[in-house]
Amino acid sequence: MNLTQVDSNATITLNYWNTFVKAVGKNVAVVVLGITINYINATMIHTFNKYHIFRLNPRYILFIHLVFNDIIQLSTSISLFVFSYAFHTIHVCFCLLLILPAIFTTQNTPLNIAFMAAECCVSVCIPLRYSYICTVKRTYIVIGIIWAISSLSILPDLFILLAVETSQFLQSRVVCNRDAVFRSSYSVKKRDASHTLFLVVVSVTLLYTYCRILFVATCADSDAKKARNTILIHGFQVLLCTTVYVQPPLIKLLVYFFPERLSDINFATFIINQILPRLGSPIVYGLRDKTFRKFLKRHLCAVNHTPEIIRKLSS
């Protein structure tokens, strides 16, 4: 009996150690990915602010807003991910401070990409009217519209929470996710409806812009074909972003078939829904755009290289 008890204790200790190592590995992987992406994104923002040519271009203004949005989204979502392992539950008030920016920025991403696709379509299909339609002032108005639409999607849930829930709930500790905080059935139905609406509007916008550019690209130059490829990348990026809309039912379905793999399911869905879409921004503009790439190379490394103009003057 003593040997059996020793074996049982050893098995429990080994399982606990394996679980601990696995959890640490997941958190380290998520944090390293987040720091890497945020470093690249912060370098892009620095490049944008340093050169006046980008601040006068609506395309780069929309792009840098997407990058800034990604930094907030990654920082808050990774914090929530780490806290879920470190503390499991946190106070509702503190959870709201983290989850609201995460929801806002998650909703902003597909809308921002849809407007970027529309801007790309205007530049290719009606270039003569581009400077009239796409101005710097109107671009900032569009950014305000993006935040307003996202606000209309989440602020009603906050008002319902404050009106329905008791003060005891606001002072309690919960697992920090949207369903645990916004528990009202109305909030759940509104979330599903808004996700469906966002998905349809963004998908229709991308499909329309791609078809317009595809028609122009069949009888135009390489710029139109490049724009067509850009729209395809936008579509793939939106596809990754919109997976968050089907995340709740998908997790329930996976947990139903694999109830013992809940932790692995949450980790996989987090990587797919939150991390991978944020890799799209550096690829689409940081690497594919020749103008931005030329200036970005000067600041991406820790040691800045001397600009080519200064080298020419010194020689």
Image (cartoon, rainbow, N blue to C red):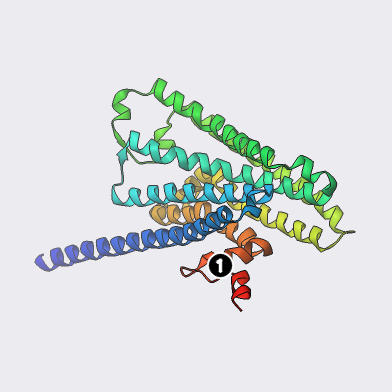
Query: Quick check: 69 above or below 7?
Result: above
**Residue pictured at 17% horizontal, 63% vertical:** 9
For label 1, the SS is helix
Q: Can you give x and y, in whole percent of width and height, for residue 209 in the image?
A: 77, 47
The answer to whether residue 86 of the structure is visible from this angle is yes
Q: Left or right of 133: which side holds 148?
A: left
**Image location (x, y in percent) of residue 174:** 33, 38
Q: Residue at x 37, y 58 (%)?
A: 27
204, above or below 296, in the image: above
Direction left: furthest residue: 2
Left or right, 28 with respect to 315, comes to left
Image mark count: 1
Q: Quadrant of the N terminus?
A: bottom left
Q: From this viewpoint, which residue is outermost toward the right?
A: 219
Do we see residue 289 in this rendering? no
Q: Is residue 65 above or below residue 281?
A: above
Question: Residue 311: percent from the left, percent from the top?
Answer: 59, 74
User: Horizontal placement of 10 versus 294: left or right?
Assistant: left
Q: What is the quadrant of residue 297 in the picture? A: bottom right
Left or right: 297, with 76 as reference point: right
Residue topped by disc 1: 298
Closer to us: 89 or 208: 208
Looking at the rendered structure, the kind of residue marked 1 is: Arg
Residue that appears at 59% across and 70% down: 310
The location of residue 62, given as percent across then percent down, is 63, 47
For this orientation, the residue located farthest to the top is: 163
Residue neighbourhood size for the residue with mark 1, other residues' Cα within 10 Å, grouped as few (<14), some (14–19), many (≥20): some
What's the residue at 25%, 60% (across, down)? 16
Q: Which quadrant does the C terminus fall into?
A: bottom right
